[in-house]
Image: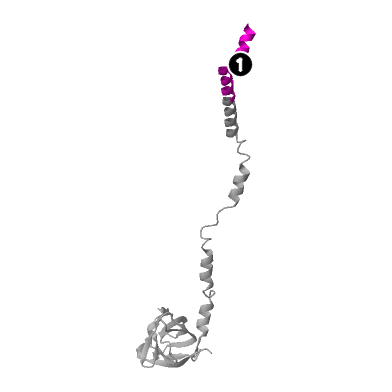
């Protein structure tokens, strides 16, 4: 009778349900344990790494074609400057010393290029020389350009000292009308004396 009672217990519906519930609980616990250990994630790791290798493009990459197009329409660095400078030639006596008393000036170089305001930026590299025992001013106020009836002052901001018994170089800027062709450089010395240097600006062929 005892063996018959055990067989009846397994064959009854409540016994079957209890056994199934115990198996499901055990399987769930096993899966959770494997997941925490990382065994179940090992198979998904390759796909994750593969996805990570296809990283999104860097910020701004999608806009690079338009940027490239914009920069492509602009001249290369330095070409506009060289082209503008070579568009005009300045004919003026170079390295000729103009002296009054113990101060002298000489023009070492001269260039002209189109200015942003539709005028010409005329730059003259000048060397001043002092024959005195004390410093002198070496500044824009010592230079001017006469174009027709107009006197154009230097406007480049030159404001240096010409050391005693020494030389000093500086660039003197004049902004003149774009149609300037014949003009005169005026060198101003202490005491009100001046020296004039005629020059010519011509477009390059």
- Where residue 7 sits, quadrant-wise, is top right
* Residue 166: percent from left, percent from top: 47, 82
Front residue of 192 and 203: 203
Front residue of 143 and 52: 52
* Residue 48: percent from left, percent from top: 59, 45
Q: How many marks?
A: 1
Front residue of 4 and 201: 4
Q: Residue at (56%, 20%) from the top-left corner?
A: 18
Q: Residue furthest top?
A: 1
Q: Main secondary structure of the magenta part?
A: helix
Q: Which residue is mark 1?
A: 11
Front residue of 21 and 92: 21
Q: Is residue 78 above or below residue 101?
A: above
Magenta residues (range): 1-23
* Residue 189: percent from left, percent from top: 38, 88
Q: Is residue 197 above or below residue 85?
A: below
* Residue 146: percent from left, percent from top: 39, 91
Label 1: few (<14), some (14–19) or many (≥20) C-alpha neighbours in 10 Å: few
Q: Residue at (54%, 72%) from the top-left corner?
A: 72
């Amino acid at each position: 009778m005892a063996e018959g009672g055990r067989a009846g217990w397994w064959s009854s519906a409540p016994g079957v349900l209890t056994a199934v519930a115990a198996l499901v609980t055990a399987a769930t616990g096993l899966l959770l344990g494997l997941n925490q250990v990382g065994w179940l994630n090992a198979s998904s790791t390759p796909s994750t790494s593969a996805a990570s290798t296809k990283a999104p493009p860097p910020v701004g990459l999608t806009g690079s074609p338009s940027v490239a197009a914009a920069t492509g329409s602009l001249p290369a660095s330095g070409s506009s400057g060289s082209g503008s400078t070579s568009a005009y030639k300045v004919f003026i006596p170079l390295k000729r010393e103009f002296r009054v008393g113990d101060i002298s000036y000489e023009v070492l170089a001269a260039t002209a290029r189109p200015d942003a305001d539709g005028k010409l930026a005329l730059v003259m590299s000048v060397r001043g020389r002092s024959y005195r025992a004390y410093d002198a001013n070496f500044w824009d106020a010592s230079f001017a350009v006469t174009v027709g009836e107009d006197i154009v002052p230097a406007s480049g901001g030159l404001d240096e000292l010409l050391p005693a018994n020494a030389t000093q170089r500086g660039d003197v800027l004049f902004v003149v009308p774009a149609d300037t062709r014949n003009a005169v450089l005026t060198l101003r010395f202490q005491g009100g004396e001046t020296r004039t240097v005629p020059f010519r600006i011509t477009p390059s062929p």
